[in-house]
Amino acid sequence: MLKTPFLSLSLLAAVAAATLTGLPSSAHAESAGAAAPKRVQVTNLTTSYEPTTLGTEVTVGYTLKNVTAFPRSAQFVRFYLLPQDGGKRALFGRAAVRRLPAGDSLSAKATRRVGQRFVEGDYRVRVCYSRRPQAVCTSTAVTPRAAVTIAPARLTADDGTVAVPVPEMFLPVRQSVRAISRLRAEAPEESARVVLTNTGQARTGALKLAIEAGDTGLPPLLEGRAAEPSTNFEVAATTCKVSLAPGRSCTVDVTRTEGSNPFASDRLVVTGARGAVAGVDLVPPVRFTPSTHDFGDVQVSESATRTYVLHNDSDEDVSVYNGLLSDTDSFYFSFEDDASFTCDDYDPVTLEPLPVPAGGSCTVTVVFEPQSEGDRTAFVALLTTGGPALASMTGTGTPGEAPTEVRPGARSFGVTR
């Protein structure tokens, strides 16, 4: 009689134990569900970008949705660019996020300028949601393909041609051109400044400077007097050394080298480590265009005309005091057309030459009229208060009638004729 209740009690205890063993599992599941991480999903990711003078601006649109049954306190999102080629991601912006009640969502847009350290290329965009600005991301979204393209760096010079002053030793206006051609600059004096700007969207990388030898500016008759060393200019000072960020500028101060000639033109080349290149022509303050001209074949006693333009590339007015031709047998100045010969204009009262304004020009007309058959070579030279200028010319006399008239031109001109 007593065993049955005992067995019943034992059986009940076993059942209760089994039941209790199962109950905690269910309760634990509910507890685990209640303690699960509160998730906020990042969805509806959109991107656009726009190049600016200071770099690329990226606009990111996104939606944050609190999919839990718990409110989320104010937190943060971070924006990254991921190189399409698999390189390391890089942060380009952050934004604070307001408190999100349970089940609530928030749509927002943020525009950030890409940092100066980014290089050209295609990038995907990643949005990261976290509790603190530097915390591990608890939720992210990434564009499936490249969404932003950063264009390469581009070096742009403020002026493609820069006039470098000549030393005063070349300025005496009564010196002959041949005497000036023998002169060589002494120690560098005044300098000219070249300004370069990165007008691209990426950094240039470290910058390197080089001066490439250009035109000696001397006609064949004086070519043997070309200056040594091979370049006539040198860098006196520069800020163009380290990598240049988008929208940033740097400067290069250039002077003439010791031993240079005043007619030479060289070229300054600035190269970035990532391929951006800019070139600037270094020229005398005054120069002719064209610097050389071939009249071609002209019959004896016939003629061909060419107008040369003297450019004043300096920042000051210059006056032309003398002009001459090296060969007067076949070449002469033509003064018949005042509109095409303006470098000899002067004040009729003071007899002083009228200045050529800074950035302005004047013209000289030369006629090739061969007196005999054969090749001819000459140069035209002007002496100005800004320095000398030379231009060379060639022509070939071909069979024709013997000359019978006196030519109306001249071999030279000065303040007065």
Image (spheres, rainbow, N blue to C red):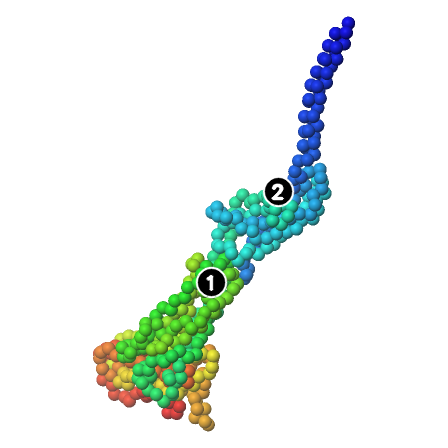
Indicate whether 199 appears above or below 362: above
Q: Residue at x 39, y 92 (%)?
A: 416
Q: Residue 354 occupies which quadrant of the picture?
A: bottom left
Q: Is the residue marked by circle 2 packed among few (<14), some (14-19), or many (20+) residues within 10 Å?
A: some
Indicate whether 26 appears above or below 77: above
Q: Is the residue marked by circle 1 packed among few (<14), some (14-19), or many (20+) residues within 10 Å?
A: some
Q: Amino acid at mark 1?
A: Val
Where is residue 217 shown, x and y percent of the image?
34, 76
Is 271 left, or right, of 99 in this rendering?
left
Where is residue 151 shown, x and y percent of the image?
49, 56
Name the residue that disc number 2 marks. 138
Q: Are marks 1 and 2 in contact (CB under 8 Å)?
A: no
| The N terminus lies in quadrant | top right
Q: Please tell me which of labels 1 and 2 falls first in the chain.
A: 2
Residue 226, visible in the rendered structure: yes
Outermost residue on the front side: it is: 2
Question: Observer-nearest residue: 139 or 287?
Answer: 139
Q: Residue at x 28, y 75 (%)?
A: 296
Check disc 1 and report its element: helix, strand or loop.
loop
Q: Residue at x 40, y 84 (%)?
A: 168
Where is residue 391 shown, x and y percent of the image?
34, 78
Q: Residue 352 occupies which quadrant of the picture?
A: bottom left
Where is residue 309 shown, x and y percent of the image?
40, 78
Question: Observer-nearest residue: 168 or 5?
Answer: 5
Is 328 left, or right, of 354 in this rendering?
left
Name the residue that disc number 1 marks. 242
Indicate whether 24 appears above or below 342: above
Question: Observer-nearest residue: 211 or 35?
Answer: 35
